[in-house]
Amino acid sequence: MIPRWVPRVTLGIALGASAVSAYLTIAHYTSPAVLACAESGVVNCSRVTTSQQSMFLGVPVALLGLLWSVAMTGLCLPAAWRSRSPLVSYSRLWLAVLGVGFVLWLIYAELFIIRALCLWCSVVHLAAIALFALVVLYGIPEGGGS
């Protein structure tokens, strides 16, 4: 049984990730100067968002984050959590796994390749980790697909 708070909390996290990802996407397509973030020292959003690692297969990582978080928002709607369809549950699970896997790569890239952190990116990273944890704890269909 899924606790009543899980759909609301996951929806809130996914919506928050969508908002921040939209902000980062706008910054990517306009100018990193619109980011309210330090540009010196370890915290340097501009350096992170304009780095070589800010693109994946020619697509801005911010846009991928936006697409991911919008999809997670749909899968975290209360109606989606109530769905008995294994497709919905497994889609939410696999998207959460994909998201956290990509986030682990991005954190590595920030720490060891770029050597700078983007606070806005970190918000999305934390959201992906939180969604992953909640989906793994509460979103795996009973019986595990057997």
Image (spheres, rainbow, N blue to C red):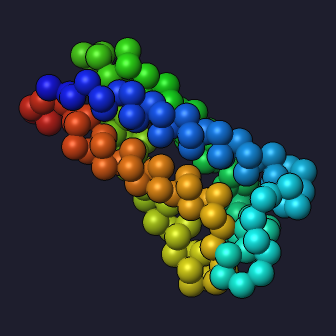
**Is residue 96 shown left or right of residue 68?**
left
**Foreground of the two, 98 or 40:** 40
Q: Quick check: can you spot residue 112?
A: yes
What percent of the width, then of the height, locates residue 34?
86, 55
Residue 29 to residue 35: above or below: above
What percent of the width, then of the height, locates residue 25?
75, 47
Residue sitting at x 46%, y 50%: 128
Residue sitting at x 47%, y 40%: 13
What percent of the width, then of the height, locates residue 44?
73, 74
Location of the N terminus by quadrant is top left
Residue sitting at x 48%, y 34%: 12
Location of the C terminus by quadrant is top left
State the image quarter where residue 91 is shown: top left
**Is residue 99 shown left or right of residue 144?**
right
Residue sitting at x 47%, y 49%: 127
What percent of the width, then of the height, locates residue 87?
33, 25
